[in-house]
Amino acid sequence: MTHQYVARDSGRVLDEELFADRIVAYLYSRVRERAPALFRAVVSARSSSLLGFVNYDLPLGARLSGAEALIRRLGIDLSECEREPGYYTTPRRIFERRIRYEEVRPMADDPAAVVSPADSRMFAGSLGQDSVLFIKDKFFSFEELLGRPVWSDALAGGDFAVFRLTPD
């Protein structure tokens, strides 16, 4: 599965390297439709908490994850961060790092500029009558996604933006 985005500094279309991409691809493959009980078990709050603990907080999990390799693979620039590079030894510290935005990523002076309070990828679209969205290998109309007619009427013809958090 290839994820692409437009780089904010160059305008180039780039391939995105996702953290745990193989796991996410597996969960959102046909497993969800063919084995719904397994899917629900894997994405349950309990499983999520356990996986989060193992991947982000357990010292052994941090060593296994390879923080330095993760930083290189995702192209994270630690010189933008408030703390020294040696602090970022676990995935949690990498994902929760604070960036010196005022110095290294100042906001545009244009009052009409759209800003995000976090590193993210943005997907924008329209909710027009003939619009469809391609999500997880399927096309959906906005009525199918929103479900209830009251929401469809309120949002019909509007535009939307989805900001998906990213670690870079």
Image (cartoon, rainbow, N blue to C red):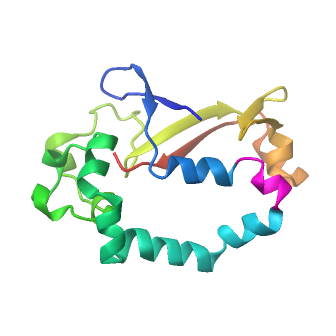
- In the displayed structure image, the side of residue 99 where residue 34 appears, left or right: right
Q: Is residue 30 magenta?
A: yes
Work out whether 56 lies above or below 105. below
Q: Which residue occupies the extreme right position in the image? A: 149
Q: What residue appears at the point 82 percent right and 63 percent down from the top-left corner? A: 36
- The quarter of the picture where residue 83 lies is bottom left
From this viewpoint, is residue 70 visible?
Answer: yes
Q: Is residue 33 magenta?
A: yes
**What is the quadrant of the N terminus in the image?**
top right
Residue 149 is situated, as x and y percent measured from the top left of the image, at 90, 51
> Magenta region: which residues?
29-35
Q: What residue appears at the point 56 percent right and 36 percent down from the top-left corner? A: 123
Q: How many marks?
A: 0
Depth check, front residue: 144 or 66: 66
- In the displayed structure image, the side of residue 133 where residue 86 appears, left or right: left
Residue 158 is situated, as x and y percent measured from the top left of the image, at 71, 36
Q: What residue appears at the point 14 percent right and 57 percent down from the top-left corner? A: 82
Depth check, front residue: 104 or 58: 58
Q: What residue appears at the point 47 percent right and 40 percent down from the top-left corner? A: 121
Residue 42 is situated, as x and y percent measured from the top left of the image, at 66, 68
